Image (cartoon, rainbow, N blue to C red):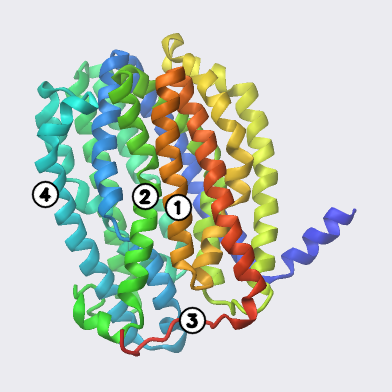
Amino acid sequence: MIARLSMKRWLSDGVFRTILRNASYLASGKLGGAVLGLVALACAGRGMSPALFGTLVLIHSYANGVGAVVKFQTWQFIVRYGAPALERGDMAALRDVTGFAFGLDLASGLIGMAGGMILLPWAAEWFGIGAQNLNLALLYCTLIPTMTAATPTGILRVFDRFDQIAMQQLVSPLLRAVGAVISYFGGFGFTGFVLTWYVADLGGDLCLWAMSVQELRRRKVRGALRPGLFGPARRLHRAWGFVWTTNVAHSIWAAWGPVSNLIVGALLSPAAAGLFKIAATFFDSASKPAELMSRSFYPEIMRLDPSSRHPWQLAVRSALISGAIALVVLLVVTIGGEPVIDLVFGKRYVEAYDLLQLMTASLVVAMAAFPLESLLYMAGRERSALAAEGTAALGYAVLLVALVHLFGIWGAGLAYVAGVCLKTLFMLVPTVHAYRGRQGLSHAPAIGAAA
């Protein structure tokens, strides 16, 4: 009864309802994408040996890892600076924001592609990709510019078009599933699966750009994608400071998955990397509700006054709901994880279930802690978020190498759990400090002030 009354009071908050609504949009796309993704992985797992499947994972992880290192979180920049400009009706400022973001995406993507392709011939053997697969891996690196571009996502979020984002989330999984089925039954082997992953990633990225351009035209915002760096930055207060801080913070943590796969492949084998990838994929799928709520939560609290209690209350409510969902998901994974892996991938991959069980020990922590990073950005504590991300990632990397040497593939799972807990702890401390000093926090960043 008390819980029902509390939920009714929470739902009377229009912002909280918007967070749940947008999260439900994203969830619908992710659910369909997860099913299609399992189809693609099943075909790849059954259509290749564990070693070749692991090599596919490593090629994809290398391009993603390089992209994660160079990627600027321009969608966060657009939400933080563009949402206040849009509310004021200041289209000139909004064009500065999107143009600056596009310029960053373009520059970082091209630099990442060039760097990744130059380093690959030396890194391929160490990561376990193999010289015979070098050309396919080089081809995959040409996706880095579209992988790193977050401007279209930011545009759709600032215009509250989460329905469009949900539709786009189905494109890559659908293309990957269709291509994987064709490669499996057509007997196209390793090359066919690599090309399938390539076309699927490219198609999804281009679709997102098309949706954002269409939305800008519908809103009659012209010139929003004219790239610029130094001119717009002079008119946007602390623009460079924000993008560099969020870039470094997210580059560190976004590289967690791809770099983990590469380290496991280098220290153990491509087959071990494939097992770790399967377990990590199931873990990521299980924690998707928190990611979806985070994507909906961040734009909404950026419109609120951080000195008030409202955004902090929303964070607690969202965290409680996400944590409760985590408990249900944990039960489902525990009961159904092994049969699903057996059905989808075959008995030779069932070992990944034991690894998954170990990793899900941190699921509730990961899902309940999702609001912490958004709160730090809202409070203007980007450097605190950077310090937390960097320290936790460094601890995780050290533990990963050490525990893999000691316990093999199980050490990778232990390190993953420890890394999630470290990140949560290091994020929680500055968030609590920011809440206690919230009376001194200002609202939105000034636009038009000298950088």
Q: Nearer the viewer, mark 3 or mark 1?
A: 1
Q: Quick one: label 4 or label 1, which is nearer the N terminus?
A: 4
Residue 346 x %, y %: 43, 12
Give the percent coordinates (x, y) of residue 75.
37, 64
- 331 up-or-down from 189: above or below: below
Q: What residue type is labelled 1?
A: Glu
- The residue tagged 1 is 389
Q: Which amino acid does label 3 sit on?
A: Ala
Look at the image and tell me whether residue 220 can be seen: no
Pointer 2 or 1: first along the chain: 2
Q: Mark 2 points at which residue?
A: 252
In this figure, which residue is indicated by the disc labeled 3?
444
For the point 70% across and 45% down, which residue is it? 324
Query: What distance separates the C-alpha of mark 4 from that of mark 1?
Result: 26 Å
Q: Is mark 3 on a helix, strand or loop?
A: loop
Residue 347 visible in rendering:
yes
Q: Which of the marked residues, 4 or 2, is nearer the chain's N terminus?
A: 4
Residue 419: x %, y % from top left = 50, 40
